[in-house]
Each structure stands twice: as C-alpha cells, then as structure tokens.
C-alpha cells in the first residue's frame, strides 16, 4: 500500500547493485559512459523531482515527499534483466529534436496503487496481482507521462533545449528491444509522510544524450556569480524607481439600475464610511488609514499595513 507505514527499517534510498565506477571501465571493455561525471544531469534530476511533486500529489490525492536518487549508467539488457518478469509499465517519451526516446518505467504494483488512490481509495493494489494492465491502468500510465512532459521541459531548459512529447499508440505493457545499448537510469522516489518509499525510473538512451554531452558534464555555476554587480545595481535602481498608483476608497455605495438611469445634475447620493478607509496599490490592498488633511491637502495616515509578500506587486 502506497501510504502504509513501513514495517521494517528499510533504507529510504533503494539499493542497486553496482559493478564499479562508471568512469573507470575495465581494460578491454567498452566504455558505457563516454561523458564521465554527469554533474548537470544529476542536478537536473533533483530539479525535476521538485517539479514532479505537484503532479504526483494530484494523482495520489496526498501530500508527498519527492526526491531523486543518484543516477546510474548501464546496458539496457542488464537493466531489463534486473527488473525480472513482473508486471511493469514501459512508457516512451519522444525527445525532440531528434528521434531518441526516453522511457518511463513503473512497477505494475505501483501503477495499480496510484490508480486506486486517484479514485479515492487507500492506495492498494489488488491481490493477487493481474498478469496484464486494464484499460484504466494504461490510462493512468499515459496520464503520468503527460504530467511529466512540462516538468521535464522546465528542468532541461537551463541545460539544453530538449522537449518531450507523447508517443502515439505506445504499448506501455511491452518493454522496447534496446539490446546492449547504454542508458542512463535516473530514479525518483516519493513517500506519504513516514511511509515506506516507492520508486520509478526515467531512462535516457546514451545515444540521445550525445549531442548534449558537454553541457551535461559542465560544473554547476552559481546564479549570483553570473550577474555583474554593476548590472545588478542598475537593475535594482530602475525597479525601485517604478511608480505605482496609490488610492484610498472612502465609500462604494450601491444603487439600483433604475435609480442610476434617473440621476441628473444636482442629485445627491448618500454615502457612509467609517473612521478608517482601505489604501490600495494597484489592485492590491496596502493597508488601512485615517482620512484627514496634511499641509492643506487631503491625506491618509496609515494605521495598519498588510503582510506584503515577495512578488505581490509583480
């Protein structure tokens, strides 16, 4: 069950067998990873995990913790064998430009748990497990894939221009035949509260990443270091010079349409207002104040201010 408490002290990070460092292949063996340390791709996965959180919470109907596991480079045949013969969803995503396809891999049990949670259940898979997916389960897999497209594009944008798209008529119940092709396996975990975590994988074909190899191995730069201090100062000065309309609404009387149509010059509209009036900046409430005079001009003395958050006036 997705949201059931863990009955064992299993680690939150799923262990995967490793045969050695990816950047140090054995003599005479083909190098699966020609790029070395995929620093940017690891950071990209962490960013993607944050972007996937709202989508997963919408499907699970619960608040979740989401994270990215360390990535791994492997032969697809080895990865395929490690998953065994259990029911698994293999959902492709087109990587554009180019003809490469990423692959979303989800345990069949997790797919059915998510389906149950989505329709208001407790996140339980049927027992015994079915041998194939129902139409509803396949629809759930397609929904997950569609929900990942936008977060994937956002996560990749700072690194390289890759867009992702659905693959028409994809059969998620059948694993593709990629043979000995090298792939990068990125794993994502999520959990409800302190419940046992569950995982799914996003696989990139190494061939599809080759055009972006130099960007994927680049060290992450500080965003602040890229901004010249003089430019930042000038930008701050310009922003602080922007003028915003400030107004105070004394009263907003209500009259009928019939009365409005009968109004003529000299008519009086009665209004009522209290000792304090709201003070507005644009369409945002700045606070309240007392109406009076200052230096011979009408003025408002602020008596309270709203809690202004960053971005309120963007």
Image (spheres, helix red, strand yellow):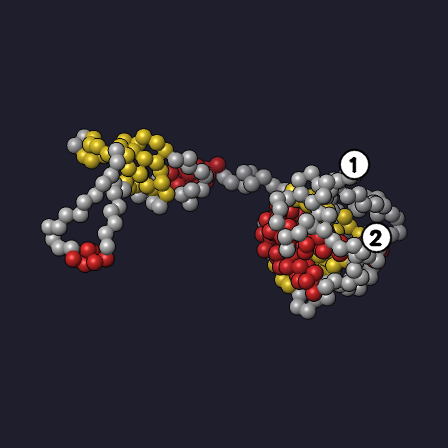
- N-terminal label among 1 and 2: 1
Q: CA distance from mark 1 to mark 2?
A: 23 Å
**Local SS, label 1:** loop
Q: Is residue 54 visible?
A: yes
Tag 1: Cα neighbours inside 10 Å, few (<14), some, or many (≥20)? few
Secondary structure beneath disc 2? Answer: helix
Quadrant of the rendered structure where residue 77 is?
bottom right
Q: Residue at x 64, y 50 (%)?
A: 60
Residue located beneath label 1 in the image:
9
Which residue is situated farthest in the left direction here?
A: 266
Say which residue label 2 marks. Answer: 82
Q: x, y (%) of residue 257?
A: 23, 57
In the shown orientation, is residue 51 left or right of residue 208? left
**Which of labels 1 and 2 is toward the front?**
1
> Marks 2 and 1: in contact by CB < 8 Å?
no
Residue 33 in the image: state x and y as whole percent: 77, 51
The quarter of the image holding the C terminus is top left
Q: How many marks?
A: 2
The residue sitting at 38% across, 38% down in the picture is 240
Q: Position of residue 310 (x, y in %)?
A: 45, 39
State the image quarter where residue 97 is shown. bottom right
């Amino acid at each position: 069950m997705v949201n059931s408490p863990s009955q064992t002290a299993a680690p939150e990070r799923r262990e995967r067998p490793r045969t050695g460092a990816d950047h140090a292949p054995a003599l005479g063996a083909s190098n699966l990873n020609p790029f070395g340390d995929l620093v940017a791709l690891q950071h990209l996965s962490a960013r993607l995990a944050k972007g996937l959180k709202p989508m997963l919470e919408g499907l699970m109907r619960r608040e979740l913790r989401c994270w990215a596991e360390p990535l791994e480079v492997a032969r697809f045949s080895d990865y395929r064998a490690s998953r065994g013969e259990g029911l698994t969803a293999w959902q492709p995503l087109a990587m554009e430009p180019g003809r490469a396809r990423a692959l979303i891999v989800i345990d069949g049990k997790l797919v059915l748990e998510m389906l149950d949670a989505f329709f208001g259940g407790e996140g339980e898979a049927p027992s015994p497990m079915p041998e194939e997916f129902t139409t509803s389960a396949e629809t759930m897999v397609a929904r997950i894939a569609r929900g990942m497209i936008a977060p994937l594009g956002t996560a990749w944008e700072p690194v390289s221009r890759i867009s992702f798209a659905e693959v028409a008529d994809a059969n998620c119940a059948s694993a593709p035949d990629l043979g000995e092709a090298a792939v990068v396996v990125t794993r994502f975990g999520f959990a409800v509260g302190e419940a046992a975590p569950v995982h799914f994988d996003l696989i990139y074909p190494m061939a599809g990443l080759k055009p972006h190899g130099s960007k994927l191995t680049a060290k992450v730069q500080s965003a602040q270091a890229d901004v010249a201090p003089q430019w930042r100062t000038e930008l701050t000065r310009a922003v602080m010079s922007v003028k915003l309309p400030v107004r105070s609404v004394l009263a907003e009387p209500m009259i009928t349409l019939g009365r409005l149509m009968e109004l003529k010059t000299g008519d009086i509209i009665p209004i009522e207002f209290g000792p304090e009036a709201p003070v507005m900046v644009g369409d945002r409430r700045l606070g309240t104040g007392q109406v009076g005079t200052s230096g011979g001009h009408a003025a408002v003395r602020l008596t309270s201010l709203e809690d202004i958050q960053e971005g309120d006036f963007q």
